[in-house]
Amino acid sequence: KTLKPVANFIVSDAPQCVLKPMPNAEKAYVWFVQDFSEGEAQVEKFAIRLRTLEDAEQFKSKLEASQEFNNKARDDSEDLVWAETVEDVEEVVDDIETNKPAE
């Protein structure tokens, strides 16, 4: 129920970043990647379990599309469509000390 999974890795080709279904779980995948979350790259095993089979298929499709895009970008393909950069929006923190009820 995270709703917004975030990962800090490069979507690359085999032998890394190959989704494999988890045994006995059609809505879950595991894969290995170079994880950069601690600053330096380390090979890590990632896993994800999605709510529905449709979500799992969509996740796999999007990851494979990212791999294809990255391959074309690496090859400097001219048929790529680059999206505009989206800036993160700063979250408003609900601080109980500053949000006191009116007297």
Image: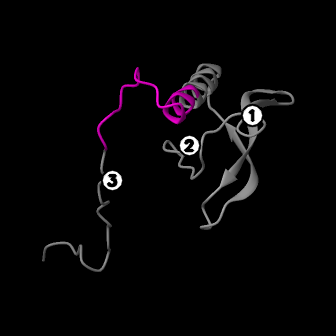
The spot of residue 7 in percent (x, y) is: 57, 50
Horizontally, residue 76 falls left or right of residue 85, namely right
Residue under numbered circle 3: 88
Q: Tell me where the magenta segment starts and ends, as one range.
A: 68-85
State the SS at label 3.
loop
Judging depth in this view, the residue of 95 and 47 nearest the camera is 47
The spot of residue 96 in percent (x, y) is: 32, 74
Q: Is residue 81 magenta?
A: yes
Give the mark nearer the N terminus: 1 vs 3.
1
Label for residue 1? 2
Taking the view exactly as shown, the residue that stands out farthest to the bottom is: 97
Taking the view exactly as shown, the residue that stands out farthest to the left is: 103
Pointer 1 local density, CA inside 10 Å: few below 14, some 14–19, many at least 20: few
> Could you tell me how far apart the alpha carbons at marks 1 and 3 are, in whole angstroms?
31 Å
Dividing the picture into quadrants, the one containing residue 103 is bottom left
Q: Which quadrant: the N terminus?
A: top right
* Amino acid type, callout 1: Ala
| Mark in the foreground, 1 or 3 | 1
> Could you tell me how far apart the alpha carbons at marks 2 and 3 are, in whole angstroms?
21 Å
* Amino acid type, callout 2: Lys
Give the mark nearer the N terminus: 1 vs 2.
2
Look at the picture and state if 45 lies above or below 60.
Answer: below
| Mark in the foreground, 2 or 3 | 3
State the SS at label 1.
loop
Horizontally, residue 83 falls left or right of residue 2, namely left
Pointer 2 local density, CA inside 10 Å: few below 14, some 14–19, many at least 20: few
The residue depicted at 32 percent of the width and 67 percent of the height is: 94
Label for residue 14? 1
